[in-house]
Amino acid sequence: MKQTCIARSIMESKFIALELSGREAEWLRSLVGDMPLWGSYLPISLHCDSQTAIGFAKNYAYNGKRRLIRIRHGAVKDLLKNGIISLEYVRPERNLADALMKGLTRRMILET
């Protein structure tokens, strides 16, 4: 995927990914809602390995200066408030996606 904006920190990059995946979750929820078998809506659980990004998303006051992050913060805040998504922390040791992005240690290979 081509990078569309520049993040100044790891937290910002994870928050941007959180907002984009929240949009996808909203689309999936509306797709499933159109099917007659699934009438009830449950929040879609998004897993994140950054407690800072989760705390930033759940904080209702934005005190930063960057317009791009302010807009994304408002979007994630609305998704949380409307019950479309829920955020859960996943420990880095349990994050399955890390094996695809980081080098594998001997311990990680032996534990699986």
Image: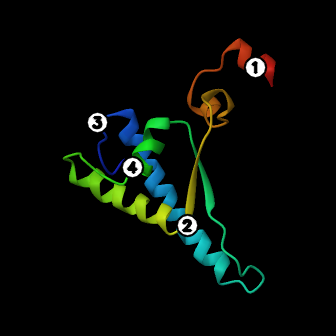
Q: Which amino acid type is marked by label 3?
A: Arg
> Residue 34: percent from the left, percent from the top?
65, 84
Q: CA distance from mark 1 to mark 3?
A: 33 Å
Q: Which amino acid type is marked by label 2?
A: Ile
Label 3 sits on a secondary structure element that is: loop
Q: Nearer the viewer, mark 1 or mark 4?
A: 4
Q: Nearer the viewer, mark 2 or mark 1?
A: 2
Quickly name the residue at label 3: 8
Dot 2 or dot 4: first in sequence order is 4
Quickly name the residue at label 2: 84
Dot 1 or dot 4: first in sequence order is 4
Q: CA distance from mark 2 to mark 1?
A: 36 Å
> Residue 98: percent from the left, percent from the top?
60, 32
Question: Can you say whether 104 is above or below 74 in the image?
Answer: above
Question: Can you say whether 45 is above or below 27 in the image?
Answer: above
Q: Label 1: how many residues lie within 10 Å, few (<14), some (14-19) or many (20+)?
A: few
Label 1 sits on a secondary structure element that is: helix
Q: Looking at this view, is 47 or 105 the one in front? A: 47
Quickly name the residue at label 1: 109
Q: Which amino acid type is marked by label 1?
A: Ile
| Residue 91 falls in image quadrant | top right
